[in-house]
Image (cartoon, rainbow, N blue to C red):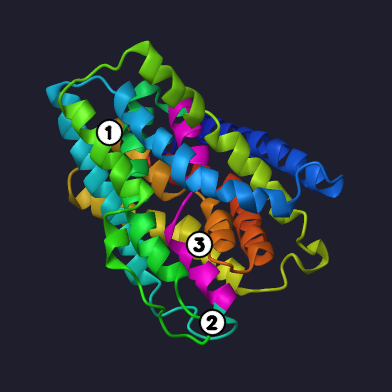
């Protein structure tokens, strides 16, 4: 039977996490309206997020994990499952969003694949499972970064007229995501412990990730016409796919692989997370429709308050 105490507890935690994030977003909206931190300035900060703060987050996650035979095995299983999650999401949504405005279609394709594994999944996993949940979700984030800086860049490089722009395949390797993993993975596998003078700067920079991303998101959301908030029905399709279809498919696949317990729960938390705020960052970097990207992220995030607890409770039944 369904554990209703756990179910409503999960719903409360998910709602609280969304509320915390949106308080920072609201501050970003206000900052944009009063001219303290505008969208123009925020766009300049996008490069800082991509090339400095994101690599720090990845490397920091490796440095925090204690190396044992169990954690090493669990790490690679979680990374593999994270890659599988994004591969399945990318393949399933290929037939969709082929028509209509090219900029918006590109944003929707990206939004279907990439979830809020860091800002939403990590805190929720910590609250529900503890450090073990953070460990497994961090592994999914590593997979996310490897995928988003390859497949994600490829999606966003689509030309307005529908053709693909010339893509530099060196970016499959020479990008912040994969390079950061190339630095962090050996440190973990070799059990390297950095001195405080090296570790603390990485930790401080990594801690900027969530607040800066939320503030930037707020500046983009400030430009959204809320009178037309649900004007594009395709966002509802994205929400249904990202919050219900994808996590149910991944739950079935993970069960077929024999995964259970905290590992399964952590993976489902990541799979059921709403569309990533990086959708807006990527839209800005590749000159897509940032207002529409903000609208998409906002709607999917709000609906996730209801759907995430259902998926987490469902995974706990196995």
Query: 64 or 300: nearer the eye?
Result: 64
Q: Report the mark closest to the observer, 3 or 1.
A: 1
Label 2 sits on residue: 160
Q: Which residue position is annotated with label 3?
A: 111
Q: What element does badge 1 sit on?
A: helix
Principal secondary structure, stretch drawn in magenta: helix
At x 18%, y 44%, the residue is 258
Judging from the image, what secondary structure is the residue with disc 2 in? Answer: loop
Label 1 sits on residue? 184
Q: Position of residue 19 (x, y in %)?
A: 67, 37
Q: Earlier in the sequence, mark 3 or mark 2?
A: 3
Left-right relation of 37 to 248 = right
At x 78%, y 69%, the residue is 228
Ranked by sequence position, the earlier of labels 2 and 1 is 2
Image: magenta residue range? 103-127
Q: Earlier in the sequence, mark 3 or mark 1?
A: 3
């Amino acid at each position: 039977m369904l554990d209703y105490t756990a179910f409503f507890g999960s719903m409360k935690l998910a709602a609280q996490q969304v509320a915390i994030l949106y308080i920072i977003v609201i501050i970003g909206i206000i900052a944009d309206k009063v001219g303290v931190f505008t969208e123009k300035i925020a766009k300049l900060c996008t490069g800082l997020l991509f090339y400095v703060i994101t690599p720090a987050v990845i490397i920091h996650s490796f440095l925090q994990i204690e190396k044992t035979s169990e954690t090493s095995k669990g790490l690679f299983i979680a990374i593999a499952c994270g890659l599988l999650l994004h591969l399945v999401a990318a393949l399933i949504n290929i037939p969709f969003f082929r028509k209509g405005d090219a900029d918006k279609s590109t944003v929707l394709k990206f939004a279907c694949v990439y979830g809020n594994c860091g800002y939403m999944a990590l805190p929720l996993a910590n609250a529900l499972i503890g450090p073990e949940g953070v460990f497994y979700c961090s592994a999914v984030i590593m997979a996310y970064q490897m995928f988003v800086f390859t497949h994600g860049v490829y999606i966003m490089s689509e030309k307005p007229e529908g053709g693909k722009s010339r893509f530099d395949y060196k970016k499959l390797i020479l990008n912040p995501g994969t390079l950061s993993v190339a630095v962090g993975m050996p440190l973990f596998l070799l059990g390297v412990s950095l001195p405080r003078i090296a570790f603390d700067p990485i930790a401080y920079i990594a801690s900027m990730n969530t607040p800066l991303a939320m503030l930037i998101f707020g500046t983009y959301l400030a430009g959204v016409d809320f009178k037309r908030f649900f004007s594009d029905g395709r966002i509802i399709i994205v929400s249904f796919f990202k919050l219900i279809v994808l996590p149910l498919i991944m739950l079935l696949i993970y069960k077929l692989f024999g995964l259970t317990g905290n590992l399964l729960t952590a993976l489902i938390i990541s799979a059921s997370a709403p569309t990533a705020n990086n959708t807006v960052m990527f839209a800005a970097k590749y000159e897509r429709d940032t207002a529409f990207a903000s609208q998409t992220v906002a709607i999917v995030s709000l609906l996730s308050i209801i759907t995430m607890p259902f998926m987490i409770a469902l995974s706990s039944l196995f």
